[in-house]
Amino acid sequence: MAVVISALISIWRVPAMGPSMLTLLGCASIAFIGGILEDYTGNVSATRRLILTMLAALLGYYLLEAKIDRIDLPFGSISLQYAWLVLPLTVLAVAGIANAVNIIDGFNGLASVVTICMLISLAYVAAQVGDMFIVVTALMVAGATAGFLIWNYPVGLIFLGDGGAYFLGFMLAELALLLVLRNPQVSTWYAALLLIYPAFETVFSAYRRMFVRGKSPAMPDGIHLHSLIFRRIVQWAVGRKEARALMRRNALTSPYLWLFSLMAVIPATMFWRNTGVLIFFCLLFIVSYVWLYARIVRFKSPRWLIWRKKD
């Protein structure tokens, strides 16, 4: 409701934004509907939600021309001109990011703060290139999410649910696509680095389930990075199963991932046009993620990460 009201006010003030903004929200509503129905009924499978999100991305491709049309390299770029390649790549990328935000939505304030940081980055870069539609839309969604955050963190009075997570993920993906598409001076690797935390979390989880555990990649498990940090780093010696202590541990888990995601968001925002530097930070993030995950899962968490209750 906050996003819709903000959109109507923006359209009233700048009517030229109306068609694009209403179309974008219309596409996002399809992803939102699949999630919100699952929240209320519990009968919408992950496959059906993914299909609805892919449908939303398909509409965005045709109605907004939001697509991946090139891949930048340090000394040039590769143009993607064939619809048979661009269409599935775009649809999978958008649906993947929407699903990725839902995956990292495991603790109070985690997905919402990560999303807010990414949206602010999008608004900043869009302002640098003069794309006011992206600026307004990104800040509009960031502001609505900040209003939600007040009630979600630290005690979790309300939650994003699948509906909210899919909506935010879809908006993030579409705005990143549109920013890069409409402004060639913005490197495609800016979007890749900006969204790499939820994206790589999803890819790594699918790899872990399929090749390490021999299970379906769609089967949920409790060993995401944020789950491991909750269990093995945020340690409280007293009241481990008492409700207040669990809530406190929940609230202390998210800041670890906020800081970790900023390892990608900050350099993406600083070097948004420098493809070589962006690629380097993408590789650095992946190496850091795998190293940290391997340390924690083997009970060798770095000492400087561990919270212990003082006597």
Image: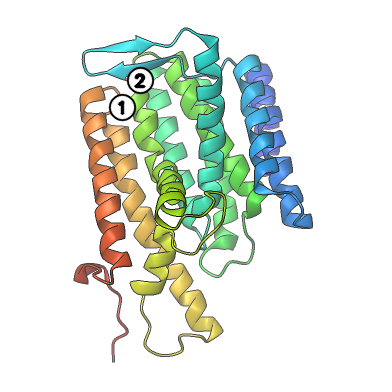
Residue 13 shows up from this direction: no
Q: Name the residue under label 2.
A: 186
N-term mark: 1 or 2? 2
Q: Is residue 145 positioned above or below 187 on the image?
A: below
Three-letter residue code for mark 2: Val
How is colour applied across the structure in the image? rainbow
The reply to whether the C-beta atoms of the residues labelled 1 and 2 are less than 8 Å apart is: yes
Under tag 2, what secondary structure?
Answer: loop
Q: Quadrant of the C terminus?
A: bottom left
Is any atom of residue 286 visible in this view?
Answer: yes
Q: Tell how many labels.
A: 2
Say left or right for 311 vs 38: left
Please report the residue visible at 51 percent of the width from the left and 35 percent of the height from the top: 172
Residue 215 vertical placement versus 34 (above, below): below
Coordinates of residue 74 in the picture (x, y in percent): 22, 18
Answer with left or right where residue 4 lies relative to residue 273: right
Q: Distance between the residues labelled 1 and 2?
A: 6 Å
List x then y, in percent, for residue 183.
41, 15
Q: Quadrant of residue 168?
A: top right
Residue in front for this viewpoint, 94 or 21: 94
Residue depicted at x 36% and y 48%: 261
Query: Callout 1: few (<14), some (14-19), or many (20+) C-alpha neighbours within 10 Å?
Result: many
Amino acid type assigned to the residue bearing label 1 in the image:
Trp
Q: Residues within 10 Å of mark 2 (few under 14, many from 20)?
A: many
On the image, the x and y values in percent for residue 152 come to 57, 61
The percent position of residue 125, horizontal first and vertical second, equals: 38, 27
Mark 1, residue position: 272
